[in-house]
Image (cartoon, rainbow, N blue to C red):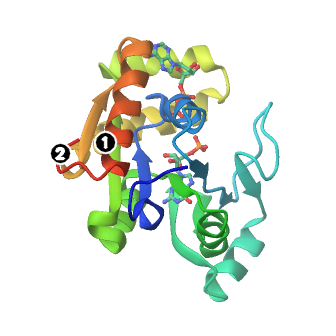
Amino acid sequence: MHNTGHRKDKIIIVSAPSGAGKSTVVKHLMSAGLGLEFSVSVTSRLMREGEVNGREYYFITSDEFRDKIANHELLEWQEVYSGSYYGTLKSEVDRIHYNGHVPIFDLDVVGGLNVKKMYGEKALALFIQPPSVEVLEQRLRSRKSDSEENLRKRLDKAAWELAFAPKFDKILVNGVLEIALKNAENVVRNFLDGAETF
Ligand code: ADP
Ligand code: 5GP
């Protein structure tokens, strides 16, 4: 099916400020026939309307989260927003590799760069950049998934997160959606096909 050498050792990391379009890009990549499978993280944050336990995240309590850290079940973890913990399960990565797929991770900028360091050349670290902070705010507001307080937390963090962009393998500006999705797909396909530049 995929005769691209060592593609199964590879991983895809996608990072961005909240609202930049990371979920939208990740969903598209997963439906593009690239053999990717989403690595479902654990989180202690509350479930949003429309989310399903085990699909977007495994929703657990802070105590359960602490147990997973203590039991070394996490590849990495971060307190992305104060009081909200997020972590990558080692078991997810194993499960996805066992399925013969390439894991795709949706990680905050710090977690993304940490995992890139662990996997080196085997990882493609993508940064999704909004056209501007103003557009980012509009998108977060139109998504209507966060309280005003949560929205402020996310916007306050965005400027700091944007400064990490140059450390990633590739920056994808998410302006016109169809163009951004096509670019994302091409970059991932080239990486999985073993191209030197993507
Ligand atoms: P993230 O996962 O980075 O927090 P989402 O993928 O949820 O961001 O996108 C935030 C909001 O912006 C969603 O309502 C989404 O439908 C919308 N959106 C994403 N990309 C674009 C785009 N290029 N143009 C307009 N709206 C977009
Ligand atoms: P949200 O609450 O909007 O779903 O996600 C908040 C942030 O947490 C996003 O930037 C997302 O990429 C990040 N995130 C989700 N899962 C993980 C994880 O397992 N580890 C890290 N480091 N960040 C994560």
Residue 14 left/right relative to 46: left
Residue drawn 36% across the image and 15% down it: 179
Secondary-structure class at tag 1: helix
Mark 1 burial class by Cα count in 10 Å: few <14, some 14-19, many 20+: few
Residue at the spot of label 2: 197
| Mark toward the start of the polypeptide (2 vs 1) | 1
Residue drawn 56% across the image and 17% down it: 141
Q: Pick whichever, 160 or 40, lies toward us.
A: 40
Residue 37 left/right relative to 55: left
Residue at the spot of label 1: 190
Which residue lies most toward the bottom here?
71
Residue 59 versus residue 140 in the image, above or below: below
Mark 2 burial class by Cα count in 10 Å: few <14, some 14-19, many 20+: few
Residue drawn 55% across the image and 28% down it: 24
Residue 161 versus residue 5 in the image, above or below: above
- Residue 65: image quadrant is bottom right
Q: Residue 182, which numbered label? A: none
